[in-house]
Amino acid sequence: MGLIRKTILLLLMMSLASCYTSKGVNYLQSEDQELSIRLNKSEYLVQPNDVLSVKVQSRDPDQAAFFNITTVENRNLQANPASLFLNGYTVDTEGRINLAIVGELEVANKTVEEIRNQVQAEIDKYLLNALVTVKLTSFKVSVLGDVKNPGTNYIYNTQATIFEALSAAGDLNISAKRKNVKLVRQVGEKSIVVNLDLTSPTIINSPYYFLHPNDVLYVETSKANIFQRNLGVFSLVLSAISTTILVLSFNSN
């Protein structure tokens, strides 16, 4: 009977060890009721292989149409990543885009607003009172690991934070490691990997709080979750061992 009690006690301790506490799952933990944190914000600079949407509008739609690559056939297509790619300008390896009539423009290492001003100045040479709109349509972020809906999501905004990306992925599972979320970012011809602690309010001041296109977030699962998934196996093994020992003890008597 003592062995059975010890086995039950061991299983109980193992179950408690696999429990989660608020300290391990809450974001932005702080004892202060109000925090003021300065944002470390930097605008994204367009890079080769990015896709830009360039639209020209004027009082004469027929004249503006010469500068737009959207055709009558696909004008009514629903906006999706594929159509945005086909109807956009891909920045080539030299950092240029080729606009109809205007020709090639250097756009690499410039903000979207700087590119808009650049294109506007060129269009003003041909059209009077034209309006140019430039958007980055290749802003996608991949979230992998211990989240509810892992995958790649497109961001239809000029900026996105790490929490917005995780929200689009359905949030972290309770078993996810919030203190060690890995961010993989392409910088030039190399990739950097950064560990981020989502439980600390200082994450908001991190230069990686605002995401860049093609960023990848990887969320590790906790040891408690791995243990919990195998708890049934451990219980079965311990039960088998205790039963075997119990049978042997009876036989020896």
Image (tube, grey):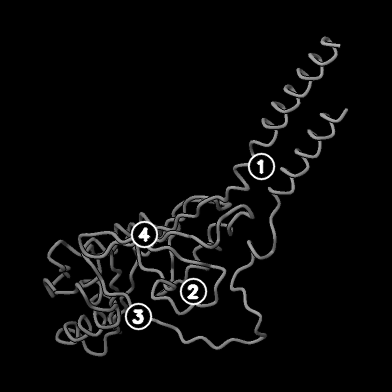
Where 108 falls versus 230 (above or below)?
Answer: below
Nearer the camera: disc 3 or disc 1: 1
Give residue 43's position: percent from left, percent from top: 33, 79
Name the residue beneath numbered marker 4: 184
Nearer the camera: disc 4 or disc 1: 1
Count neighbours of disc 1 (C-alpha within 10 A) and say few if under 14, some if 14 to 19, many if 20 or more.
some
Determine the CA span between mark 4 and mark 3.
17 Å
Name the residue beneath numbered marker 1: 228
Count neighbours of disc 3 (C-alpha within 10 A) and say few if under 14, some if 14 to 19, many if 20 or more.
few
**Residue 132, disc:** none
Point 50% across, 77% down: residue: 202
Determine the CA span between mark 3 and mark 1.
41 Å
Q: Earlier in the sequence, mark 2 or mark 4?
A: 4
Nearer the camera: disc 2 or disc 1: 1
The kind of residue on which mark 1 rests is: Gln
The kind of residue on which mark 3 rests is: Ser
Name the residue beneath numbered marker 3: 42
Determine the CA span between mark 2 and mark 1.
29 Å
Q: Secondary structure at mark 4?
A: strand
Name the residue beneath numbered marker 2: 203
Q: Earlier in the sequence, mark 2 or mark 1?
A: 2
Determine the CA span between mark 3 and mark 2.
15 Å
Give residue 150's position: percent from left, percent from top: 50, 51
